[in-house]
Image (cartoon, rainbow, N blue to C red):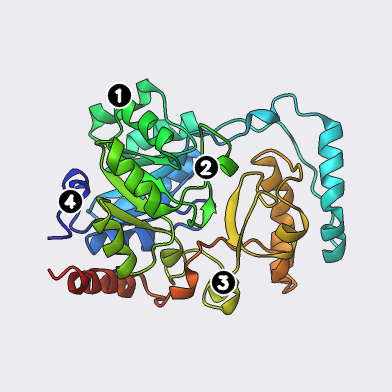
């Protein structure tokens, strides 16, 4: 039976289908609860939230589902380059982006380079909430944090973009590893080497991990339908994680413009860029990502995000979506569902037919 895997056993879910933990304000309790209540694992991306906001989200989640769910955080949520970052570099890079602000007739925001990490405080709140699963990217938490997760019965899931990262995660005793393929939308969560050196495709990465590690594997990147689910499981994955397919659903907090673009012909064109946040991510091609080449120096994360936040808001308000970053994986052309419930039913029923359950 395809839906009985190491992941379903460990996470105590009915189907090995995970909703990608979309951070940056895209996650909703409604989306998480829909997926979890239907037997998958709903997720909530919380890396941008304050500890109090995470606590409130946890209360709302627990009021919406009694099924297992996942909260996701970023281990590295502030780039090291921000330490003693020079005012000269700040001025040079903001000048590079000034024409876009001028085009929208808005001022460049005043930026403070003093941005402390929230991760440690976020984890303290996560221990209070006690989700069934704590997933993380951009590194691995301290041994003390992992030990406390084991003590509380919280399963840990780390993200890997290479075999080396997966081996590193396994050596620290995580419960499962997400094989984050090159095709995935959103940020590229590499942590041992620069993201541009960690561009293995999903199915190749799954097979590499399957050959070398014992930890259960979750395939992520370019999977939007039952054919992708069946292919990943056939290659040895213990579960799949879908991001873009759930991002396109009504229950996500993506803007109407974002969702409309995901279902348009434009979605076939994606690009890897760090121009919008300071870290490499896959998005639908836009003018800024094309004009600010990848090798161009931008502000460290999350300072670049703070620079671009008001520009994104103004561009949406003025209908200039060519200046907006719409996250997407490489397989949006095969999106069909705008309801998370219908998407889950399709994944379950069609995978049953393909794998002849």
Residue named by callout 4: 5
Mark in front: 1 vs 3: 3
Residue 84, placed above or below residue 199: above
Q: Quadrant of residue 322?
A: bottom right
Instruction: Name the front one of labels 4 and 1.
Output: 4
Residue 56 lies, with reference to residue 265, above or below; the image says above
Which residue is tagged 3? 267
Q: Nearer the viewer, residue 149 or 236?
A: 236
Nearest to viewer (mark 2 / mark 1): 2
SS for dot 2: loop
Q: Residue furthest top?
A: 144
Q: Position of residue 291 (x, y in %)?
A: 78, 58
Frontmost of labels 2 and 4 is: 2
Image quarter for residue 134? top left
Residue on which the image places disc 2: 198
Q: CA distance from mark 1 to mark 3?
A: 42 Å
- Side of 79 where 15 appears, left or right: left
Q: Is residue 266 above or below residue 104?
A: below
SS label for mark 1 = helix
Residue shown at 14%/71% (left/top)?
A: 356
The label shown at residue 147 is 1
**Image quarter in which the N terminus is found:** bottom left
Numbered tag placed on residue 311 in the rendering: none
Nearer to us: label 2 or label 3: 2
Q: Helix or strand or loop: what does disc 4 sit on?
A: loop
Structural distance between the alpha carbons of marks 2 and 3: 23 Å
């Amino acid at each position: 039976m395809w839906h009985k895997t190491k992941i379903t056993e460990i996470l105590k879910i009915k189907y090995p289908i995970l909703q990608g933990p979309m951070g940056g304000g895209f996650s909703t309790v409604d989306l998480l609860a829909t997926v979890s209540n239907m037997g998958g694992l709903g997720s909530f991306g919380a890396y941008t939230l304050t500890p109090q906001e995470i606590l409130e989200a946890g209360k709302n989640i627990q009021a919406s589902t009694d099924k297992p769910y996942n909260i996701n955080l970023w281990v590295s949520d502030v780039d090291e380059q921000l330490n003693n970052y020079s005012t000269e570099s700040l001025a040079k890079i903001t000048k590079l982006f000034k024409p876009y602000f001028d085009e929208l007739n808005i001022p460049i925001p005043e930026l403070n380079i003093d941005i402390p990490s929230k991760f440690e405080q976020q984890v303290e709140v996560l221990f209070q909430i006690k989700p069934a699963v704590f997933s993380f990217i951009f590194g691995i938490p301290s041994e003390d944090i992992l030990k406390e997760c084991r003590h509380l019965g919280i399963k840990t899931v780390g993200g890997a973009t290479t075999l080396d990262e997966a081996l590193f995660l396994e050596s620290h005793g995580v419960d499962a590893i997400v094989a984050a393929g090159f095709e995935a939308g959103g940020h590229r969560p590499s942590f041992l080497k620069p993201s541009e050196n960690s561009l293995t495709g999903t199915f190749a990465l799954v097979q590499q991990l399957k050959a070398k590690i014992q930890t259960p594997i979750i395939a992520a990147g370019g999977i939007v339908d039952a054919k992708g689910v069946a292919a990943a499981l056939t290659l040895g994955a213990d579960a799949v994680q879908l991001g873009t397919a759930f991002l396109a659903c009504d229950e996500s907090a993506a803007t109407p413009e974002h969702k409309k673009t995901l279902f348009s012909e434009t979605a076939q064109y994606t690009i890897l860029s760090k121009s919008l946040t300071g870290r490499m991510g896959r998005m639908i091609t836009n003018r800024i990502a094309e004009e600010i080449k990848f090798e161009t120096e931008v502000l460290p994360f999350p300072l670049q995000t703070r620079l671009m936040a008001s520009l994104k808001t103004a561009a949406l308000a003025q209908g200039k979506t060519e200046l907006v970053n719409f996250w997407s994986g490489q397989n949006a052309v095969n999106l069909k569902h705008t309801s998370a419930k219908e998407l889950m039913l399709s994944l379950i029923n069609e995978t049953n037919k393909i794998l002849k359950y």
